[in-house]
Image: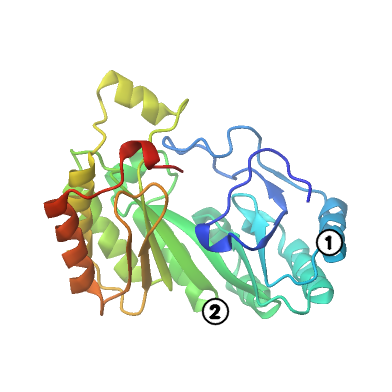
Amino acid sequence: MRYKGKVYRPPSEATSLIVQVTYGCSHNRCAFCSMYDDKNFSMRPMEEIREDFEMARRVYKRVRRVFLADGDAMMRRTADLVEILGLIAGLFPECERVTCYASPRSLQVKSEEDLRLLRQRGLAMVYMGLESGCDAVLEKMCKGHTAADIVAAGQKARRCGLALSVTAISGLGSRELMEQHAIETARAFSQMKPEYIGLLTLMVEKGTPLEQWVREGSFEVLGAEDVLRETEIFLQHIDSEGSVFRMNHASNYLTLKGTLNQDREALLEQVRWGLESGDLKEEYLRLL
């Protein structure tokens, strides 16, 4: 496969065929993120996309899953995405799932008719970043949307038959907004009730505005114990029956896995055990 710049994918797409259909992130202004700082957002030429899929068919005997990169593949024209999905179906009849990242903006600009068509043609799930349900945090971090905007985008995706996987970032509210961030993020998830919920833990990336704020002392990064206290508050307030919950990213201090709401008490017990035992991931082992 041919890739331009750094390529990212969700943990659950580790074994997927990854093909870039866009480059970069359509927003690319979040204060905490440097993921796509090596390229500007653009559409990859369709001819190159076709060539990569044809190359993959020659190389791989079986392709079970396909992930369409980069950070906002949903921003492509619906007609292009329909063509790409048709190409996948024709070349890889054994493929069980096609997914991509989607921003709140790209889900907003697509009509419900478009989203239903994409689902019909084989797009199974979209990954979206909530980051926080607290508007004060979202504004500080230059997310570009309110929590209500993001919730509405997620609800729209689910209404159109797309499975939804949403992530938030523990510690993003600093100490100042820790409780508000936890409670309002839980509320946003409860309103969307996505199929999958993922909690990452904040890591300060070099070259970002966040790094400058930390250096200046205007943003206090939470330590491991405070992150777990925030997680405890989050779990106490979330009501998202049936959502698969994962806190197993490389950035997390403690690994948690369960299904809401049935596993809430077991998850809370694990958080309390982590606080009492102090048996948490060492800082140097945390990764993005």
In the rendered image, the vertical position of residue 267 relative to residue 218, given as above or below = below
Give the residue number, with chain letter if any, for mark 1: 59
Q: Identify the element where label 2 is drawn.
A: loop
Give the residue number, with chain letter if any, for mark 2: 161
In the rendered image, the vertical position of residue 9 relative to residue 266, given as above or below = above
Measured as percent of width and height from the top left, residue 60 is found at 79, 65
Name the amino acid type tagged 2: Gly
Name the amino acid type tagged 1: Val
Q: Which of 107 and 253 lies nearest the eye of the viewer?
A: 253
Q: Residue at x 42, y 37 (%)?
A: 32
Q: Identify the element where label 1 is drawn.
A: helix
Q: How many discs appear?
A: 2
Measured as percent of width and height from the top left, residue 160 is found at 54, 77
Instruction: Determine the residue located farthest toward the left in the rendered image.
Output: 276
Measured as percent of width and height from the top left, residue 214 is found at 31, 26
Left or right, residue 251 beside residue 118: left
Q: Residue at x 45, y 39 (%)?
A: 30
Q: Which of 264 and 116 lies nearest the eye of the viewer?
A: 264
Decide which of tag 1 and tag 2 comes sooner along the chain: 1
Mark on residue 257? Answer: none
Within the image, what quadrant is residue 186 found in?
bottom left
